Amino acid sequence: MGMKMKDYYNIAYAKMLGNKIKVQYPEFKLNQFLKFIELNLDDKPFLKRQDLFVDGFDKFMTHNYKDDLEVFGKLLGPELETPEGMFKEGWWLWPIGRYIERHGLVDRELSILFIYELTKRYTGEFAIRPLLNDDPKATLEIMIQWSMDPAVHVRRLASEGMRINLPWSKKSVASLEFPELFRKVLDNLKEDQEKFVMKSVGNNLNDLMKERPELAEEIINDWQKDEISKSTAWIIQHGLRSRKK
């Protein structure tokens, strides 16, 4: 994006998104929504802009989590065709992810289903965090399933969502409460051929190396007991990069 990220979420964007919502949910108070955004946008930083849009959804949509998700589900459109497509085509869905981040605990099961679909068009890495922090065991068990999914974006989410120091998100060590489940996700992904997934697993190890170096080293040592693939070798190198500095 040539412009600053925050500037993408402007009044023109609000009209585009608002019109999409109105098509699927005719009762949507589009004009009030746009006026609310325009009055409050001023020079808000990036995440505050995301929160403003979520405030707008809360004020002017259905006032029911399940019904809002149904509307948002109809907006999602086709799955991304390329691994890193979220960085080119998925930006417009960020406030919807932010809405799940705020309200996801209202209905865990529905949220998990929605995040699974959202991540194939943008990313669910932020939306999954409150669920992970609330119930790390149940969420990690889902992420183990996701780590074996045919969809590259879902496999990446399994790793990225449980990172300790996820950019644009609060630090979370919830996954470390169940190190055997945390490990299982990484073990399932260590042979992944997709660079997009490999980067995430390496970043995960890099975060772990700063927080719990003994666990990171134990994982790497176990991987190295057998002959390792090119993917695993690259992931280990990426995961050790901070230590080498």
Image (cartoon, rainbow, N blue to C red):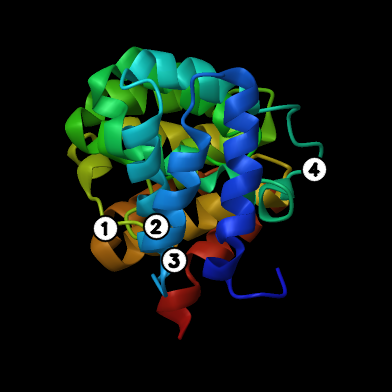
Residue 62 appears at what percent x and percent y? 38, 20
Which residue extends farthest bottom?
245
Residue beneath disc 4: 82
Residue at 32% in and 26% down: 139
Whether label 4 touches label 3, CB < 8 Å: no
Figure quadrant of the C terminus: bottom left
Check disc 4 and give the amino acid type.
Answer: Thr
Q: Nearer the viewer, residue 144 or 46?
A: 46
Check disc 3 and give the amino acid type.
Answer: Phe
Check disc 1 and give the amino acid type.
Answer: Lys
Whether label 1 touches label 4, CB < 8 Å: no
Residue beneath disc 2: 166
Tell us which disc is closer to us: 1 or 3.
3
Q: Residues within 10 Å of mark 3 (few under 14, many from 20)?
A: some
Q: Is residue 106 above or below residue 13?
A: above
Q: Nearer the viewer, residue 21 or 154?
A: 21
* Label 1 element class: loop
* Label 4 element class: loop
Name which of mark 1 and mark 3 comes first in the sequence.
3
Rounded to the nearest angstrom, the CA distance separating label 1 from label 4 is 28 Å
Whether label 1 touches label 3, CB < 8 Å: no
Residue 46, numbered label:
3
Rounded to the nearest angstrom, the CA distance separating label 3 from label 2 is 16 Å
